[in-house]
Amino acid sequence: MTRFGVMKHLKLLEEAGLVVTRRRGREKLHFLNAIPIRLIHDRWVSKYTEPWVATLSGLKHRLENKTMQKVFEIYIKTTPERLWKAITDTEMRRKYNFGAVVTSDWTIGSRYEGVGGGMPVLEGENLEVDPPRRLVQSFRALWGDDVKSEGTSRVTWEIEPVGDSCLLKVTHDQLREDANNQLYGGWPMILSGIKTLLETGEILTTPGSLRWLQGEKEQLAEVSRSKS
């Protein structure tokens, strides 16, 4: 395949939203955009074809593990202000399953903590705060020993107005090579949850979202029983 053919193919994938790009100096890096692929999965894939999808997904992760960053983007019909609130507001974050945020005043240098089911699930520091356009945070997962050992990475939220909608870009970088895919594998569900909440007012009911909600309810019930 010629270089021109590759460039033409990548351009078509980028226009279709299946590939997102980032420039680093003179290089133009290409990343698979898992959001639209996940939306198709949630809507159309049956339990009979899911094992095949899981196999291909595993292949995707093995091929991409050499990269040090993951890039996701999604269009949401909302305003930058509402989208910023969805990212930073405690109650809204709980609705799309990203852990309620406590101990943060959303200023540069402030600390934040994500809580799910009454237990810390993530923490970090706000490195850049520019509402309602850009938020850069350090990120450390706390929900299990296997992810705690991965240390600290970085998450950048970028909001770009497009007509009556917004393009939300999330870049998760400073990941070690072969990092545990739990650190970034949940982004498609989280961003799809934000889109569903802001556009319909409803909570995402995909299998992954329901498992998270059920787990949070069970943890809250356990905390309540221990207190009583």
Image (tube, rainbow, N blue to C red):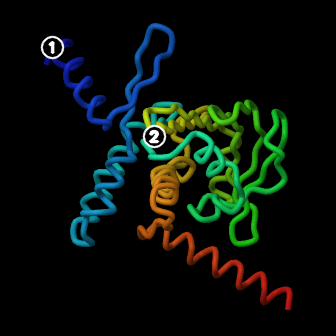
Name the spot of residue 116 as percent of width and height, x first.
69, 66
Which quadrant would the N terminus be assigned to in this image?
A: top left
Query: Which of pointers 1 and 2 indicates the residue nearer the eye?
Result: 2
The residue under label 2 is 165
Name the spot of residue 119 as percent of width and height, x first.
75, 67
The answer to whether residue 176 is visible is no
Q: Is residue 40 above or below residue 134?
A: below
Category of crowding for the residue at label 2, using alpha-carbon neighbours closer than 10 angstroms: few (below 14), some (14–19), many (at least 20): some
Task: State the residue at coordinates (76%, 44%).
Answer: 124
Task: State the residue at coordinates (73%, 30%).
Answer: 128
Q: What residue occupies the far left of the structure in this picture?
A: 1
Task: Classify mark 1: helix, strand or loop.
Answer: loop
Name the spot of residue 105 as percent of width and height, x first.
83, 45
Find residue 60 and report its image quarter.
top left
Question: What amino acid type is highlighted by mark number 1?
Answer: Thr
The answer to whether residue 117 is visible is yes
Name the spot of residue 30 as percent of width and height, x first.
38, 26
**Which of the pair 109/88 is nearer the observer?**
88
The residue under label 1 is 2
Category of crowding for the residue at label 1, using alpha-carbon neighbours closer than 10 angstroms: few (below 14), some (14–19), many (at least 20): few
